[in-house]
Image (cartoon, rainbow, N blue to C red):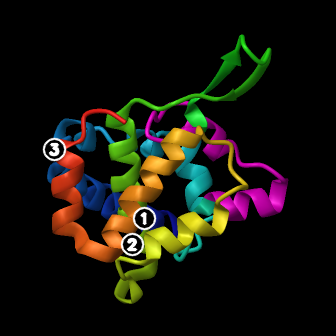
Amino acid sequence: MKAIKHFITITKHRHEVIRNCKKAGILWQGLFHDLSKYMPQEFFLGAKYYQGDKSPNVGERAKKGYSDAWLHHKGRNKHHFEYWTDYRPETREYGPVKMPIKYVKEMFCDRVAASRVYKGKDYTDAYPLEYFLGGKGKRLIDSETSDLLEEWLVMLKEKGEEETFSHIRKADKY
């Protein structure tokens, strides 16, 4: 039963992302969004740790101290800022690097869709920003990438989806 619920949740999320990507002018990316969630390495763990109101990765981390499904997922999906870490010659350390704007757009679409799916009828355009701000300063993300995402989330809260997606469609650099 958890496998069916998990399948429904990830499919609902994916369809929401596709709709958002179309509004953001990146439909092609949306069509390929999160296909790795259907791969056995992610799907079966997602079903095992399915909770319904948050990512199964949270449950897997609570049990094991890390999430195999997340490690698999973030390494294959460029719309996650965690994908964008590399060796930085200037610091001689691994750290976050600036994301290409097309993936920042997809990340925005993903965050809005996840908020809609997990909050359900309690969703507001303010929630994606609240969630983002709750983790601010705790994540390893390039500062310019973080600032751009936050700018768009603030715009969503203050001006709504139509104006925000119109703005994102026109954005080609930052």
Q: Residue at label 1?
A: 114
x and y percentages locating residue 132 in the rendered image: 55, 64
Magenta part mainly helix, strand or loop?
helix
- Please provide the residue range marked out in magenta: 57-81
Q: Quadrant of residue 62?
A: bottom right
- Secondary structure of the residue carrying tag 3 is loop
- Secondary structure of the residue carrying tag 1 is helix
Q: Amino acid at mark 1?
A: Ala
Earlier in the chain: of badge 1 and badge 3, it is: 3
- Secondary structure of the residue carrying tag 2 is helix
Q: Is residue 22 left or right of residue 143?
A: left
Q: Residue at label 3?
A: 25
Mark 2 or 3, closer to the camera: 3
Inter-mark Cα distance, 1 to 3: 19 Å
Against 79, is 152 above or below? below
x and y percentages locating residue 88 in the rendered image: 69, 17
Q: Residue at label 2?
A: 117
Label 2 Cα crowd, 10 Å radius (few <14 / some 14-19 / many 20+) = many
Please tell me which residue is depicted at 49% across the width and 63% down the height of the picture.
3
Mark 1 or 3, closer to the camera: 3
Towards the viewer: 131 or 63:
131
Earlier in the chain: of badge 2 and badge 3, it is: 3
Residue 61 lies within the magenta run? yes
Q: Amino acid at mark 2?
A: Val
